[in-house]
């Protein structure tokens, strides 16, 4: 099964994608994570993307379409993948349709995570990630069981994203409303859209997603 998690910054796409990956053996494809890896590695793509990401704007369609087109060809995607943060513009959605058709693949369901803007700022400014295994945490909503120690791997260093400050979050939210929200209509017309309440607690959101996926 192939699916898209659609929602604004802080909606919980990454949190839920990791859970679906573990429970169902699908691969999480996060263009944000891939771009951050490229920035860290100092590749050509990374050098182009760095300032754009720090400003909270969208990286060019060509770059992200190229990344996804190559990535879905890898063997681990054969049994299904979760797109997290892609597509983000109508042009990306159209390119995705074309490339999936060319590769003989289909998009089974698009899950829209409905959330309100204001609480997202707090979700994002409170976010941290284990520097070793990448497990995500929140200062208030998802603390490690032992303070300062990763639940998954025991590591004690955590990192915060360069774009996780209030000013950049506001730009990311406006980019979402202007450029990404039109995809709700795009997939609504195709009949693949399912909407869930992303304001619920993390476990409740997982339960709603499982109900959608079980019905596909
Ligand atoms: P990307 O990395 O995709 O960031 P984003 O869309 O801004 O989303 P986030 O990762 O911030 O949020 P999330 O929905 O994953 O939330 P999470 O689960 O972590 O993109 C970054 C940048 O890269 C973009 O701005 C752009 O520049 C570029 N880019 C990427 N893809 C692109 C594309 N296709 N085209 C062009 N440019 C692209 O949760 C957030 C926090 O809230 C966590 O701390 C979590 O613990 C907590 N939380 C999660 N769910 C809940 C809940 N239900 N209740 C309470 N807290 C919760
Ligand atoms: Mg994310
Ligand atoms: Zn860890």
Image (cartoon, helix red, strand yellow):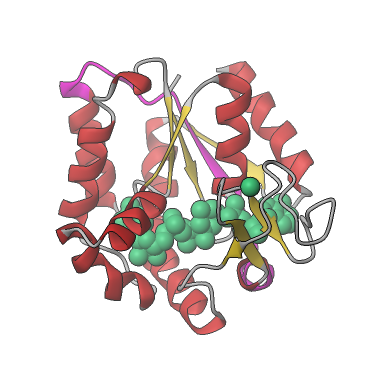
Residue 4 locus on image (x, y percent): 45, 37
Q: Nearer the viewer, residue 20 or 145?
A: 145
Q: Residue at x 31, y 65 (%)?
A: 58
| Residue 201 appears left or right of 214 | right
Is residue 179 in view? no
> Among all residues in the image, which is located at the extreme right?
146
In magenta, the rendered stretch is: 101-122
Establish if 199 lies above or below 59: above
| Residue 188 appears left or right of 159 | left
Q: Quadrant of the N terminus?
A: top left
Residue 162 locus on image (x, y percent): 46, 73
Is residue 171 in view? yes
Q: Residue at x 37, y 58 (%)?
A: 36
Residue 46 locus on image (x, y percent): 24, 61
Establish if 29 lies above or below 22: below
Q: How many numbered markers are drawn?
A: 0
Residue 86 locus on image (x, y percent): 36, 46
Establish if 187 lies above or below 123: above
> Among all residues in the image, which is located at the extreme bottom?
167
Q: Is residue 129 magenta?
A: no
Establish if 81 lies above or below 50: above
Q: Quadrant of the C terminus?
A: top right
Q: Is residue 107 magenta?
A: yes
Quarter of the rendering containing residue 174: bottom left
| Residue 158 appears left or right of 145 | left
| Residue 112 appears left or right of 73 | right
Q: Residue at x 46, y 79 (%)?
A: 168
Q: Nearer the viewer, residue 10 or 38?
A: 38
């Amino acid at each position: 099964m192939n699916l898209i998690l659609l929602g604004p910054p802080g909606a919980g796409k990454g949190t839920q994608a990791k859970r679906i990956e573990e429970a169902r053996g699908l691969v999480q494809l996060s263009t944000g994570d891939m771009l951050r890896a490229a920035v860290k590695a100092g590749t050509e793509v990374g050098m182009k993307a760095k300032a754009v990401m720090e400003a909270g704007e969208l990286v060019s369609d060509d770059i992200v379409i190229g990344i996804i087109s190559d990535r879905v060809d890898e063997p681990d995607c054969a049994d299904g993948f979760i797109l997290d943060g892609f597509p983000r513009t109508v042009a990306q959605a159209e390119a995705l349709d074309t490339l999936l058709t060319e590769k003989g693949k289909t998009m089974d369901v698009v899950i829209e995570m409905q959330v309100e803007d204001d609480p997202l700022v707090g979700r994002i400014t409170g976010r941290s990630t284990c520097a070793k295994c990448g497990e995500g945490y929140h200062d208030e909503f998802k603390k490690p069981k032992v303070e300062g120690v990763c639940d998954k791997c025991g590591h004690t260093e955590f990192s915060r994203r360069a774009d996780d400050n209030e000013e950049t979050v506001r730009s990311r939210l406006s980019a979402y409303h202007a450029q990404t929200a039109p995809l709700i209509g795009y997939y609504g017309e195709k009949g693949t859209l399912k909407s869930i309440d992303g304001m619920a607690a993390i476990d409740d959101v997982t339960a709603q997603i499982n109900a959608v996926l079980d019905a596909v």
